[in-house]
Image: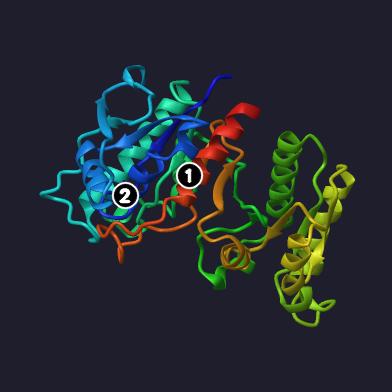
Amino acid sequence: MDKPVIGVTMGDPAGIGPEICAKALSSSEVTAVANCVVIGDRRALRQGLKVSKIDGVEINSIKSVDAAKFKPGVIDVLDLDNADPARIKTAQVSKAAGQAAFEYIEKAVELAKNGAIDGIATGPINKEAIHKAGHKFDGHTEILASYTKTKDYGMMFVSDRLWVMLVTTHIPLHDVSKKLSKQNILKKIKLAHETLTRLRGRKPKIGVAGLNPHAGENGIFGQEEIKIIRPAVEEAKKLGIDAKGPISPDAIFYLANAGMYDIVIAMYHDQGLIPLKLLSFNRSVNVTVGLPIIRTSVDHGTGFDIAGKGWANPQSLIEAIQVAAHFAKTR
């Protein structure tokens, strides 16, 4: 395969999405590995170039991927013409911005399913804005699963220091225990095993975190490890998967960072993401595994506090595009 074609969704046009798209797609780190098409709005991207003080870059506004130039100094934009600056104000949550961001995702999924692009790297969306626009999804992952009719999927985070798969994602902390099941944990272990085996050509070593302090201390601090997590790990072992756990949450990430495990299965969002971001902020990538299409994403939000100031760091988007390109080649 020559350089794969990656569709880059702009994210919420009121946030830092246009800025990081402008910076990332002007970078040789991206152009060296992928042919990219921004799925967004030319006007928002032009503003991103302006606030980022990037000169000498042409915006090629197109209506189909076939019209892309894929050449240095040009950013190809599949222009949905839906982010009118008169209606969308920088750093403000709005229905219009949420609808625009949602349409970028819809278009990207359509293109990926039709084979017009080889993968998707998504910019950050604002969940409140998406909800204002009438789309009651918890985030990108759930949107993509719905639009591809995928039941078994997972949120995996990839970085230079740590790989993490989440069992539960965007739910309140008090609901985590109720949402955990042997079957759900086993599905995530299997997805991690299949994904890493394909990427690395060998069986990965998988560490499964406990939920409670000290992994429950044999039931003293909770029963989830005994009743749910350990049975899932034992079932995975019967399938030939190299999984160990439940392991105390306060130790497992140290062990994984030291090389003992290739990936950690975390029980809930912050359990996995706090250590990941501590070690690799702006260098980690969100990968949705289990989908029939390739999707990676930045590991940060819309950055309304710095939007429009030109300060946004594009590194996570650069990494997301690179990982999407790598996954496309392995597939």
Q: Amino acid at mark 1?
A: Ile
Q: Residue at x 44, y 52 (%)?
A: 139
Q: Nearer the viewer, residue 296 or 30?
A: 30
Q: Please count the marks in the image.
A: 2
Coordinates of residue 282 in the picture (x, y in percent): 50, 57
State the residue position of label 2: 19
Instruction: Tell me the element at label 2.
Output: helix
Q: Position of residue 186 (x, y in %)?
A: 74, 50
Q: What's under tag 2, amino acid-wise?
A: Glu
Mark 1 vs 2, N-terminal side: 2
Residue 318 — which label?
Answer: 1
- Left or right: 214 in relation to 240: left
How crowded pointer 2 is (Cα within 10 Å; few <14, some 14-19, many 20+) is rated as many
Image quadrant in which the N terminus is located:
top right
- Nearer to the camera, 164 or 181: 164
The image quadrant of residue 66 is top left
Q: Is residue 133 visible?
A: no
Q: Quadrant of residue 72?
A: top left
